[in-house]
């Protein structure tokens, strides 16, 4: 017949995964709360899978404006994430 495999998820591994998810959510919330409203909106649209061209069309601005805005938000997010992790 077949070989039976044990469930790889132990109570401890499930607990660890939940803690990591909570930590990631806390970091994301911290970062998003420190971005401008425009940066947040554009980052969320990009995360939803819209292209920069589509975001530019929706926002009625140039592609370059969107590209610069998202790059600046990403740079800022990296610094904010580092700042958050140093606090804890």
Image (spheres, grey):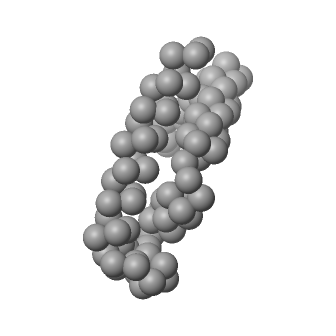
Picture coordinates of residue 50, whole percent (x, y): 43, 73
Say which residue appears at 37% left-offset and 50% top-offset: 72
Comparing 29 with 76, the one in front is: 76
Count the marks. 0
* Residue 29 coordinates in the image, percent (x, y): 64, 41
Q: Residue at x 49, y 31 (%)?
A: 81
At horizontal 41% and vertical 36% (from top left) the residue drawn is: 78
x and y, in percent, of residue 84 in the image:
55, 25
Q: Quadrant of residue 57?
A: bottom left
Residue at left offset 49%, top offset 33%: 80
Q: Is residue 5 above or below residue 86?
A: below
Residue 21 visible in the current orientation: no
Figure quadrant of the C terminus: top right
Residue 41 locus on image (x, y percent): 56, 64
Q: Which is more toward the observer, 38 or 5?
A: 38
Determine whether 61 is above or below 40 in the image.
below
Could you tell me if residue 37 is visible in this image?
Answer: yes
Judge from the rendering whether residue 47 lies leftward or rightward of residue 64; answer left or right: right
Question: On the picture, is 56 further left or further right than 28?
Answer: left
């Amino acid at each position: 017949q077949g070989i039976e495999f044990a469930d790889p998820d132990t109570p401890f591994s499930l607990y660890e995964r939940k803690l990591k998810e909570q930590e990631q959510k806390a970091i994301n919330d911290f970062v998003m709360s420190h971005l401008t409203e425009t940066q947040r909106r554009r980052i969320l649209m990009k995360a939803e899978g819209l292209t920069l061209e589509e975001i530019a069309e929706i926002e009625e601005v140039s592609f370059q404006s969107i590209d610069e805005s998202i790059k600046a938000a990403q740079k800022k997010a990296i610094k904010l994430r580092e700042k958050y992790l140093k606090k804890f």
